[in-house]
């Protein structure tokens, strides 16, 4: 009897080799497996070299005194259910001096974190949240030397800070590596100051790349299983060449302790910001001046795109780079500075990494085809903030609303009474939604009375007839959804609505 055709696979894991015979299915390609490198016998030599450049960062903040029977010291943080939780609660309630209406004395609160020296002159990198609000910052070296530190610059959005200390001799330092070369499965070392214990070394691997944990607009974290705990914030993540490939910043944990899911800001994001903090005292990120939203399958279909991709423009800052480049509401940014924009989360990082003052090509999707414009980037202004959302006024039926069949909304022209009812701007254009069917498409997409329809299918509308005309045109093209630009008190947003049933379609 002939044995079936087979291939021989040789695998090596932690120095152990085995030979496996695996039958091949007819027509399937032979895949040669990768061979893992042996694990280091010890990290001791590498750790000994790196530890002197990692520091303890201690910051103190003076807390304003409080008055009244409820004033008192803050209770220390304990894991939920800890027996110490009730003990300290009872102790503080009976012993703090803020009871009986007596003023509580000013207190100094302390925060502990980590950092690493990047220059022998005493430049130290850490997280902004480690020193945020601090009145005094102290750095402790591995030999227990304590030095006062001053802030050179801070980046609140990116959670990066640069400190400076004065020493009587050159300090040991480490260098940034190329985080782009770090691969999932590579060995890494994390060194820091967990729970204020002092220099601590842990080892693990790169667990994932490009993690978005919704901490900010530029999330692109390296995930690692090297144990990281409270106090590790601001400490370095090293590769096996002893170069910094990340700054440990956050952990995922239900208890506050390490469960093997830690996140580090890649060095390729930290290093340019540190250079800007050193030169300018603040970050200088590129700024395009647009509000964006995700391109959903419904939006892509309504715009004639083959698949959802890119970032859709939902607002343009007047006089900003996008405005000057003739980028419009409803455009979809497909490429920025020759880099593909696969979804909306990539665009802020790509723009921020681009040089201020640089003119870059921007590929857009507009009116069913691609076009390219040139945008000259500005520096991101500190005062660009989204306005706080406010609740619209209750639904009130104005005179002669018009039912838009199939969408589940009623529209009316904007009148002075409706402006007052829905708190609309004096120069508001479009048509206002006066009623939303509870089970209709509009309600499913979150539309409410008081929302204003400004554009339909990227065309401005000034009357209910304009809206109906554009919807009829979409139906004749046999598209499944129609795209509305909605103005709310918290800004503009593109909303795709599915077209109604067949009985609502116009005859072809």
Image (cartoon, rainbow, N blue to C red):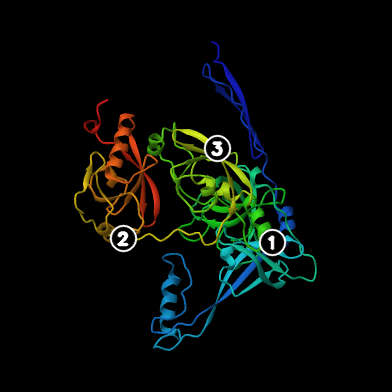
In the picture, measured across the screen, residue 448 lies left or right of residue 194, that is: left
Quadrant in which the N terminus is drawn: top right
Q: Residue at x 46, y 74 (%)?
A: 75
Q: Determine whether 173 is above or below 467 in the image.
A: below
SS category of the residue bearing label 3: strand
Give the residue number, with chain letter if any, for mark 3.
Answer: 372
Looking at marks 2 and 1 on the same chain, the residue that comes earlier in the sequence is marked by 1
Percent x, y for residue 348? Answer: 53, 49
The circle on residue 370 is none
Q: Is residue 161 above or below residue 93?
A: above
Identify the residue position indicated by label 1 in the image.
278
The residue closer to the viewer here, 286 or 7, is 286
For marks 1 and 3, the one nearer the N-term is 1
Task: Give x and y (percent) for residue 490.
Answer: 39, 57
Q: According to the image, label 2 marks what residue?
A: 423
The residue depicted at 40 percent of the width and 41 percent of the height is 458
On screen, residue 299 above or below 32: below
């Amino acid at each position: 009897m002939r044995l079936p055709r087979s291939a021989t696979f040789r695998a090596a894991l932690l120095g152990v080799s085995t030979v496996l015979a695996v039958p091949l299915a007819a027509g399937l390609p032979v895949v040669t497996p990768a061979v893992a490198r042996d694990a280091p016998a010890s990290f001791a030599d590498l750790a000994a070299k790196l530890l002197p450049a990692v520091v303890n960062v201690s910051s103190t903040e003076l807390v304003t005194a409080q008055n009244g029977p409820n004033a008192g010291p803050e209770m220390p943080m304990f894991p939920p259910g800890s027996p110490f939780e009730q003990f300290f609660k009872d102790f503080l309630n009976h012993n703090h001096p803020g009871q009986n209406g007596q003023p509580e004395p000013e207190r100094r609160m302390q925060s502990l974190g980590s950092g690493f020296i990047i220059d022998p002159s005493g430049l130290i990198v850490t997280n902004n949240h480690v020193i945020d609000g601090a009145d005094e910052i102290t750095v402790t070296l591995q030999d227990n030397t304590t030095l006062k530190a001053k802030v050179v610059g801070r980046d609140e959005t990116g959670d990066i800070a640069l400190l400076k200390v004065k020493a009587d001799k050159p300090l040991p330092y480490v260098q940034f590596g190329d985080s782009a070369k770090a691969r999932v499965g590579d060995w890494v070392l994390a060194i820091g100051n967990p729970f204020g214990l002092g220099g601590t070394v842990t080892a693990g691997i790169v667990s994932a790349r490009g993690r978005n944990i919704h901490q900010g607009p530029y999330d692109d974290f390296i995930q690692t299983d090297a144990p990281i705990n409270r106090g590790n914030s601001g400490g370095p993540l090293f590769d096996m060449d002893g170069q910094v490939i990340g700054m440990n910043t956050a952990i995922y944990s239900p208890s506050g302790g390490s469960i093997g899911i830690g996140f580090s800001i890649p060095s390729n994001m930290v290093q340019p910001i540190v250079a800007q903090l050193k030169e300018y005292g603040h970050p200088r990120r590129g700024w395009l001046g647009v509000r964006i939203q995700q391109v959903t399958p419904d939006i892509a279909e309504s715009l004639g795109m083959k698949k959802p991709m890119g970032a859709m423009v939902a607002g343009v800052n007047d006089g900003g780079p996008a405005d000057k480049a003739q980028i419009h509401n409803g455009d979809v940014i497909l490429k920025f500075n020759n880099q593909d924009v696969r979804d909306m989360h990539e665009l802020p990082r790509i723009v921020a990494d681009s040089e201020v003052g640089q003119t870059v090509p921007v590929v857009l999707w507009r009116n069913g085809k691609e076009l390219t414009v040139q945008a000259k980037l500005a520096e991101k202004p500190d005062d660009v903030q989204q306005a706080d959302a406010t609740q619209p006024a209750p639904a009130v039926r104005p005179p002669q609303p018009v039912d838009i069949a199939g969408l589940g909304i009623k529209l009316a022209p904007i009148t002075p009474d409706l402006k007052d009812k829905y708190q609309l701007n004096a120069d508001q254009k479009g048509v206002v939604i006066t009623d939303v069917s509870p089970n209709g498409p509009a309600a499913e997409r979150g539309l409410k009375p008081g929302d204003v329809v400004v554009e339909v299918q990227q065309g401005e509308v000034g009357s209910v007839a304009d809206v109906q005309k554009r919807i009829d045109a979409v139906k004749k093209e046999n598209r499944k959804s129609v795209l509305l630009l909605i103005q709310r008190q918290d800004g503009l947003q593109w909303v795709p609505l599915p077209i109604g049933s067949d009985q609502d379609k116009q005859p072809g």
